[in-house]
Image (tube, rainbow, N blue to C red):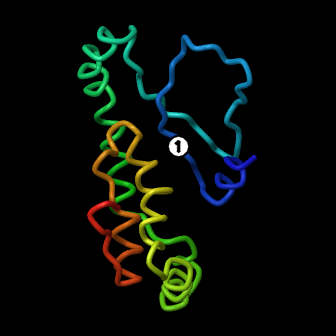
Amino acid sequence: MQIDAIASLFDETRIVVPVDRKSATTGSAPLTGHNVSVVPLTVPNGRDLSRKLRLPVSRTRNMTRTAKARFVIKTFYRPVGQGSLHKSRTQYAIRTLFAGEEGLERLHKTVTQRAQTLPGLEALNKVTETIGGITGQTLTAEG
């Protein structure tokens, strides 16, 4: 339902995710929505050490897909609402929501660090940098 709601906002939605075709699908639900497509990233075969040794090959296969995702995020990411609201209103809302000692750190932990766990997005920091620039905050060494 969430994917469908998000996809309805765009002409086309591509979801780039690791797909393990061998794993059980119990409890899984298909991704559906307006012009939704899945771009599968390969997952290395094997277990433990053998899986780790296959990781470089898997990363190479996925490189062009993740490079495109990084390019789109770095080039086109804007805070939600910035397209429809005046920039000053969007920035006021962001400063209000993320003000305070923990605002940027919490955003970094719940959004940026989660995105960084995806293959090829380890260096992604666009959301934290954008919101930090608007709020005038920077992360502490622990954040």
Q: How crowded is mark 1: few (under 14 residues within 10 Å), some or many (20 or more)?
A: few
Report the front residue among 4 and 95.
95
> Can you say which quadrant of the picture contains the C terminus?
bottom left
Q: Residue 126's image quarter?
A: bottom left
- Where 136 sits versus 73, above or below? below
Residue under label 1, please give it.
14
Q: Would you identify the image quadrant in which residue 58 lies?
A: top left
Residue 14, given in percent of the width and then of the height, sits at 53, 43
Q: Is residue 34 above or below residue 99?
A: above
What is the x, y in percent for residue 11? 60, 54
Report whether 59 appears left or right of 97: left
Task: Tell me if 92 is positioned left or right of 60 in this view.
Answer: right
Q: From this view, report whether residue 42 is shown above or below residue 136.
A: above
Residue 128 pos. (x, y %): 38, 66
Seen in the picture, residue 42 relative to 104 is either above or below; the reply is: above
Report the label total: 1
Residue located 28% across and 14% down the image: 54
The structure residue drawn at horizontal position 53% and vertical position 83%, both measured from the top left corner, is 90
Q: What element carries label 1?
A: strand
Residue 141: percent from left, percent from top: 26, 63
Identify residue type, mark 1.
Answer: Arg
- Seen at 64% across and 14% down, the residue is 24
Residue at horizontal 30 percent and vertical 11 percent from the top: 49
